[in-house]
Amino acid sequence: MRSARAIAHSNVALAKYWGKRDERLVLPETGSISITLDALWTEASVRFGEGDGPDLIEVGGAPAGPSDGRRTLRVLDLVRSMAGFSGTAEVHCWGNLPLGAGLGSSAAGFAAIATAASAALGLRLTEAEVSALARQGSGSACRSVPGGFAEWLCGRAPDGSDSYAVRLFGPEHWDLRVVIAIVNSGRKEVSSRLGMRRTAESSVFYDAWRLSVERELREVRQALADRDLTRLGEAAERSAMRMHATTLGADPPFSYWLPATLAVLSRVRVLRRGGTEAYATIDAGPNVKVLCRPQEVGVVEAALRDVQGVEDVLTSGPGPAARVLPA
Ligand code: DP6
């Protein structure tokens, strides 16, 4: 039977991806670097059959929404064409991530789908090829394929063949922790795809953002190599604040932040003033992810739980690569 099951973990960008140079192939304007999150994952099962009926795509037991459905179809079609196979597919995804809340559900989801679908049709792809496949479902998903601390190479080739993620370090390299303050687990109003498109097309701050990325990539790479939390945290905060600043310069302007987002940022600064090294980063949503050392997780969790508007707090260490699971 042509079927396979795979698991992948979500990731948080330390140096952000924000804007595409090619929308269809999902090619980024800049490189980006992430930490994979062990605690947040998605599993995908993919089964291919003969016949020519429509594909079935389910997420958490319900039919996928139009955007997730379209992108899944794109990944399935790429896999079918690589394998020279023309039958139908049945895809089921489930996991422990709220959808569309900026917690990396699409990153984990498409990394798992690309891994499972290519295995189901017996394609012997390299990790880079699976990563490039996942990228075409959702850009950030390419970083969840190698897992650990991963860099998405921007690439130059017009066909996207050199735009995929590589592992800078495995999860065992550095026992860093990410404490996540959930201030709203609902679906965001502006998806990352639309948000980055609007920003790249219209933000008066977009060029400044693009020009700032190279330095942050260098800083993050070096900080990871040296396991230097101060350097990493400062670079990650700068990257996040500058990315979010571009949304305010867009036309029309928008923001992913809620009042509680600002309250958490302020609490993180209070923690630092008190001697706890904690640094904030935010993806396309209102939830705040705080980087810290394992021995300070208790203090950071308690401080974030105490902020008005924080619904929940969860903590993760670095997570592994996407992988095929036994049938
Ligand atoms: C802010 O990967 O979700 O989280 O490629 O359009 O699917 P698409 O976008 P997506 O964008 C993630 C944006 C970000 C930053 C990041 O993860 O690097």
Image (cartoon, grey):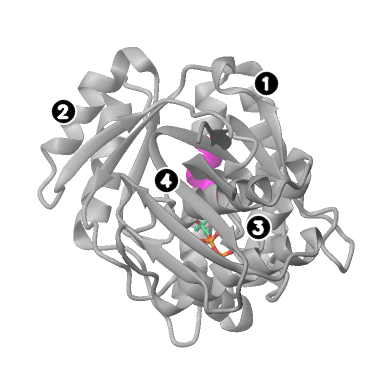
Q: Main secondary structure of the magenta part?
A: helix
Stretch in magenta? 234-239
One can see residue 29 in this view: no
Counting residues from the N terminus, which is met first, the one under dot 2 or under dot 3? Answer: 3
Picture coordinates of residue 294, whole percent (x, y): 36, 16
Picture coordinates of residue 301, whole percent (x, y): 21, 29
Q: Nearer the viewer, mark 4 or mark 1?
A: 4
Counting residues from the N terminus, which is met first, the one under dot 4 or under dot 1? Answer: 4
Cα distance, mark 3 to mark 4? 16 Å
In the rendered structure, the answer to whether residue 116 lies left or right of residue 82 reads left
Picture coordinates of residue 26, whole percent (x, y): 68, 67
Cα distance, mark 2 to mark 1? 30 Å
SS at mark 1? helix
Contact? badges 3 and 1 (CB < 8 Å): no
Counting residues from the N terminus, which is met first, the one under dot 2 or under dot 1? Answer: 1
Would you call the spot at circle 2 few (<14 residues within 10 Å), some (14-19), or many (20 or more)? few
Q: Where is mark 1, residue-wise?
A: 225
Please name the amino acid that badge 4 sits on: Thr
Q: Where is mark 4, residue-wise?
A: 42
Which residue sits furthest right?
A: 157
Q: Where is mark 2, residue-wise?
A: 302
Identify which residue is drawn at 66% across, 63% down: 136
